[in-house]
Image (cartoon, rainbow, N blue to C red):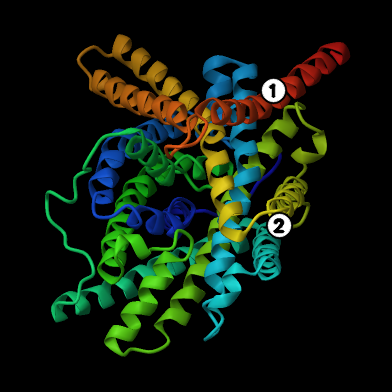
Amino acid sequence: MAELIRALKVRDIVLFNVVAIVGIRWISIAAATGPSSISLWLLALVLFFVPQAVAVIYLSKKYPIEGGVYEWAKVEFGDFHGFVAGWCYWANNLVYYPSLLISVAAIASFIVPGGSGLASNKIFIASVSLVVLWTAIGFNVVGVKIGKWVQNIGAIGTFGPIIVIAALAGIIVYLGKSQTHFSFANMLPTKLDYGTLSFWSSMCFALAGLELAAVMSGEIVDAARTIRKATYLSGVAVVLVYLVGTVSLLIGLPAKDVNLVTGLVQSIHKLEIETGVRYLTNISALLITLAGIGGAGAWLAGSARILFVTGIDNYLPSAFGKVHPTWKTPHVAIIFQGLIATAFLLMSFIGASTEQAYLVLVDATIIVYFIPYIYIFLAAIRIFRREARETPGSKSMLKIIVSSIGGVTTAAAIVLTLFPPEAGGNPLLFLIKSLGSSLAFVAVGVIIFWVAKRRKVAFS
């Protein structure tokens, strides 16, 4: 393994996890469904987030090495499965970056008073998205000691708007002007139809990402211990941000009026008018933009490490495995990741409005991203089964059950994503489109692996 600098500590990984996992846009999407989203958040916490945390903690303890999910799958199931897991993890980001950057750019339009109209201007959105993307790239290329501050400041930008909207919501409740009535009955789903289940699978996706820091284990001080402590702390923070943000947003706006992209800032603006406090909308928009830069930086840094380790293993060009002589970062992998993300970002605007581009990209992300999670849970189950055989009477059986619940939840989320989220669409056409595009991503990875494998055999 090429020389890397271990500069990330518990605080850095906690903030890294928060900015990577928390998507302000998911708060808007959840609030748009109404108070029932609260119980759906809690269900996703129990059936997906907790199993994810258990699996990541123990896999990081067993294999605290650069590459994360790629290495976990490779060691437990072989080179082919390791490459497929790593490839899907990387390929998912081709569509994730644009969806993240589009939402951040739309919110950035609120930074300047009177600039909210720019949220539907594709030239503005594309320009801001590219600035955010390449700012994150620049900081990550010049070294993890510098790059980590993009994520750290981004995490502060994540907490800031939540604190603002929670404070404003508290004032509105005190004044008796809440736009949403909360009760035990209306916080439960009114019906468990396909639409509700499909939406819930998206909420599981919103809680995913604890494994991202482990991809950078070679740059973390005492990786196993640091990831374990950071996972506990960041897990609590993530859940609180989503729950407090969703409730506060609904206090400011009725569910039917929530914009899927800019809903949080929209609610802060309305609460600002109600309370007479000025400029909180602009400040919050700035903070969310910083959070977006941090989130882009986190996913860019993590997914580029997949290119890095596969370059070292010679499944991808060996240039990806190079480390900068001064900055000690996989600079080739990071810059290449940025170029690919730029191409997909620009393509996402062809013939589509800002919101249309955003929604299409979000829908395209989930299946490919959840494939590595199947490997994560299966690898964890294998480790716990070995522990159970070696140490009878341990808690390994409970860990197996928890990891199995996570695996089943992940498989269900994949299946639900294959069908249209709303009635009236053509289910067969949607199935062909979603399954076909996902299989195409996987097929490209399989072809690359076998070509590289044959080349390695020929030269051995």
Q: Which mark is residue 285?
A: none
Q: Give the distance between the C-alpha atoms of the residues marked 1 and 2, in whole angstroms.
A: 30 Å
Q: Which mark is residue 141?
A: 2
Secondary structure under tag 1 reads helix
Q: In this view, does 450 lie to the left or right of 188?
A: right
Q: Please name whichever residue, 356 or 282, is drawn nearer the observer in this view of the structure.
A: 356
Amino acid type, label 2:
Val
Q: Residue 443 carries which label?
A: 1
Q: Return the disc, 1 or 2, that comes first in the chain's sequence.
A: 2
Query: From where the camera sits, is residue 219 visible?
Result: no
Which quadrant, please, contains the C terminus? top right
Amino acid type, label 1:
Ala
Query: From where the camera sits, is residue 51 visible?
Result: yes
> Residue drawn at (44%, 75%), measured in percent from left and top?
284
Q: Is residue 280 left or right of residue 152?
A: left
> Residue drawn at (87%, 12%), measured in percent from left and top?
458
Position in image of residue 97 (x %, y %): 61, 51
Q: How many labels does the image show?
A: 2
Question: Residue 406's quadrant in the figure?
Answer: top left
Q: Please name whichever residue, 447 or 460, is drawn nearer the observer in this view of the structure.
A: 447
Residue that protrudes farthest toward the top in the picture: 389
Position in image of residue 187 (x %, y %): 19, 50
